[in-house]
Structures are given as C-alpha cells and as structure tokens.
Amino acid sequence: MNVLFWERDFKTMLSSLPVQYRVKRYSHSVFGGPKLAEIDVSGSEMDLWELAEYARRPVKIYSVLGDAVWWGYVAEIQLNIGPWTFGVNIDSMANVVGVAYEDDADAGQPKKTDWAKAADSITEYGRHELLITSSGSNEIHALAARDKYLSEKKYPVSIISPREKGEDGAKLTCRGWFDTLAWRYASIPAHLAYGYEQPGDTNYSFGDNNAKEVAQGIWFSGDCNLVSISVYVRKVGNPSDNLKVSLCVNADGITPGAELTSGTVAGSSLGVDFAWVNIPVTLYPFTNYDSYFIKITRSGSQDAANYYQTHLESVVVYPLGNYTVLIGSNWALGPAADMQFRLYSDDIIETSQQISTLVANYGQFIAGIYVDHQSGLYTASARDGNANAYYEISELLKMGTSNYRRLLVKIDEFRRMLLYEEPVVPSLAYLIEKDGSLRDMFDTGLRKELCPVGVWARYKDIIPGSVDITKLSDPSLMFIDEAEYIPNEDRLSLTPRGFIDPFQLGRPRDG
C-alpha cells in the first residue's frame, strides 16, 4: 500500500520522505466514512524527525491497484528515537478560546467571554475551539484565564518522555474528516433553515462606481417555507434608496437568473458597522434540492459616495457556489471569497436540513453536503452553542427518518459528504464466507481493502444445519456499521449495527 500526504491547505502534495510506511490497520464507518488508521514508519533518525510537523496534514492510503481506500488527517504522532519518545496530538491544541463563568461581581450570573483567537494558528491548522469553565470568577479573571490558555495551547502541545530500549520508528494515528466537526461549537438561531456564517475579513463595495450588484451562489436541499433572508452588510455614506435582497435561479454558476422572491429595507436604517440585516421576503416554498443565488442590489443609481458593502471570508470554505458581481452589464466571478447569509423558515426545520446547515457552518474541511434522502422529521432548529457540531449532528442522525430507519453519512475522497437513509433488507444480501471474505449478491468476491459498510450481509455456511436456532434472533443477517482492514493479515473485521459484546455485559446482582 502507498501513503501520501498533502500540505494543510490541500493544494500541494508533500515530497515523499525516504522512509518506509506500513499500514497497520484502517477502518470505515456508516457515520462519516473513513474513521481511524494506524501507520507504522521506519527510517533514519533525521527522516523520522521530519514527521513531527505532520499534525493535521491530509493523508490518503492507496491500494496496490492505485485507488484511494482511506483518507483523513494525521491526528497523533509518536516518534520513538533512541532512549526518548516524542509525542504530539492535535487534540492538545485550541486556537480559539472562551470562558464560561459565574460572575461573582453579578450575584453569580452565568456569563461567557468573547472568543480570543490566534490567527496564525487558525490559518495553519484550522479553527479549533475550546470553551473552558470557571465556577467562581469575574470578568477580569475570566479574560486572564482565557488569554493564558490560548497562549499555551494555540499550537499542538508536544511531549518528550523516556522509553525502554527498542528500535527507532514512528507511529501515525489518523482520523477521518467527520471527526473535525467536534472542533467547532454550534450556535444556530431559531427557524434558521440554512446559512453560512463564517466571520469575514474582506470588505467588498457595491452600488458605487464599481459593482452594481453582488450575489452568492448556494445549494439548498430541503422542504420549508422561506420567509426572510439575512445578509451581513453595512452602508457607506448616507444612501437614500433601498437595499434589495433576492433569491434567484442559478442560471450558469455565475449569473443570477429569474427572481423567485425578494424583499427590501431602507438604506438609511443600516448602520456604518457591519451587522446582520434580516429582510422579510414573499413566502417561497422550497420543495426539493437545487442551486440558487442570493442577490443584493440597490434600488437607486450607483453613487461613488453613498453605497453598500458586504463582508467576505477570503479563505473560501463554502464550496457550493460562487461569489459573483455585476459590473456594467455583465456578470463575472468576484473575488475568491464567500458571503455570509441566512435563510429563515416560518416553522420548525427538517432534521436533514439542520444537518446541512451545521455542516455548511462548522464543517471547515468538508467540501459540501448532498442530501440523498430527506428525513421527513421536523424539530426546532435553535442551538445555544454549548455543544459542538459533531454532537449536534450525531443527535440528529440518531432521530432517523419518518420511515423508521437511520440517517447515515459518508465523506468521500474529495471531502464531500453524502447524507442517506439506511437501506431496507434486500431480497439478495451480500454473503460473508467462513474465512471472513465478502461476496456480493451475484457471488462475486469483493475487495477486502475497500472496507464496505452500509450494506446488508448474510453469513454463509457458518452455522451447521443440524443446529436448532429457531428460538434465537437470526444471527446470520447483519447490517455492516463498521469494517476494519488489517493489510498484513489480509483480514477484514466487520461490526454489525447495534453490536454489544454479550460476553462483556456482566451479571446483575442478586436482589
């Protein structure tokens, strides 16, 4: 097997080190796709030390046939060199820190500080948030604790410790991209059907002598009534006309097409500082999935002194649409940036749509989500921000669908997420042979190294026909939730849905 690594910005493949990689094991799950991988490394002392810088680097494992069989990022590095062990774990870092505390100066009222950020670390590793708590404090103490923690933890913490004598080598523990949803706390307003709210760092003017209009392409997959659109804007000078926001058809990826609904707000009501402006629109019923544009324009003429600005995120994270601008009479791609937006519904939100919103906002390494099957279940969408996105999404997945089946997700090689419904038991399931090999419904052997999950399988010729199992649940049929492959043994280990080891349950006490 071959192992390749990339720079943290995903743009450049790293040059191969003169070391030997041995993939010890890797696994896939129906909750996220690639889950864990362990890679042993051997080489010279200096070459092994090069791996110390590999934390959060993207990694892919390729089969002997040349296709990718596992993908994710390096989460933990352990170097065993001479009498020492050097270790670093991505979980040890936090580059965005806040403090939740009970304010002694205000009768113990619960409060939170603003987030403190280490911009250089965020650029390098991604946003890794941590909210620490203090039961007795005040604002001064809380802010001091926040800043101290950030200064100590903004980079992955490395540890050196003595070890017993042994061969030099390294071990890389890698995780799938679904795991990174735990890096961000999820705060969602009530009735939010969809949105992208990354904090911006670039101002872009429109309605002046440059761009007449601006638009953000989006991909919406849901079933709800759109009643308002929020944009993050400000005024420059004193525009006396109206600011108009529209939901439009996506004509060609660059041009907003026919207007589906719109609303306006007086330009004079906007502030000179950026803020969310919620604009009611004529109700528009979303009933399927499609691509759209959110277009912003002014009702009056262009004015070089009195105009409007959007606040853009220059690191393109939202992958499902372009930021485009109208200059003169032609639409064209704008700066490589994303515009913040929110779409609000008049009622509770479908859970699959809530997952889409959480991924769009907090899946910083996930290149979009496609909803193959809508859940058909509706709940309140508000989140207070005290739990991370991984937890919130996992809870929504557990709710399943209106068909009483689970919602499952997988992330592909290109970091695109698919949300789908657990399939029903087919008339012809996959077959599991005595030696653990897997065959499809046509009795064709499947490659073990692909770790097939999310399918129904039936054990073949394992239980003798003379054994009476009529008083037991059918042990031959299973839905594969996880699969682990061990290359050195060419062995595939399958974990069924809801697996509980019956030999680890213990015995209840008498009485």
Image (cartoon, rainbow, N blue to C red):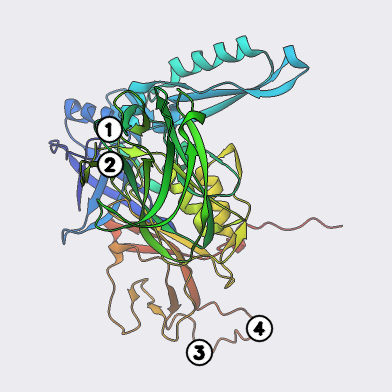
Q: Which callout, 1 or 2, points to the residue nearer the camera?
A: 2
Q: Which residue is pictured at 26% across the width and 28% down the height?
A: 53
Write down the residue under mark 3: 465
Q: Earlier in the sequence, mark 2 or mark 3?
A: 2
Q: Which callout, 2 or 4, points to the residue nearer the camera?
A: 2
Q: In the rendering, at what x and y percent does residue 249 appear?
A: 34, 58
Q: Between 12 and 115, which is closer to the camera in this rendering?
A: 115
Separation of marks 2 and 4 at Cα, in angstroms: 49 Å
Q: Residue furthest right?
A: 511
Write down the residue under mark 2: 58
Q: Earlier in the sequence, mark 3 or mark 1?
A: 1
Q: Between 181 and 48, which is closer to the camera in this rendering?
A: 181
Q: Earlier in the sequence, mark 4 or mark 1?
A: 1
Residue 165, can we see it? no
Q: Between 53 and 24, which is closer to the camera in this rendering?
A: 53
Question: As displayed, is residue 50 above or below residue 107?
Answer: below
Separation of marks 3 and 1 at Cα, in angstroms: 53 Å
Q: Quadrant of the C terminus?
A: bottom right
Write down the residue under mark 4: 471
Q: For this view, does 468 lie left or right of residue 136?
A: left
Separation of marks 1 and 2 at Cα, in angstroms: 9 Å
Query: The disc labelled 1 sits on which kind of residue?
Result: Tyr
Query: The disc labelled 4 sits on which kind of residue?
Result: Lys
Query: For the residue carrying disc 3, how many other residues have a C-alpha within 10 Å: few (<14), some (14-19), or many (20+)?
Result: few
Disc 1 element: loop
**Disc 1 + disc 2, Cβ < 8 Å:** no
Q: For this view, does 145 lie left or right of residue 445?
A: right
Separation of marks 2 and 3 at Cα, in angstroms: 49 Å
Q: In the rendering, at what x and y percent does residue 258 appear?
A: 34, 59
Question: As displayed, is residue 214 above or below residue 284?
Answer: above
Write down the residue under mark 1: 54
Question: As displayed, is residue 239 above or below residue 284?
Answer: above
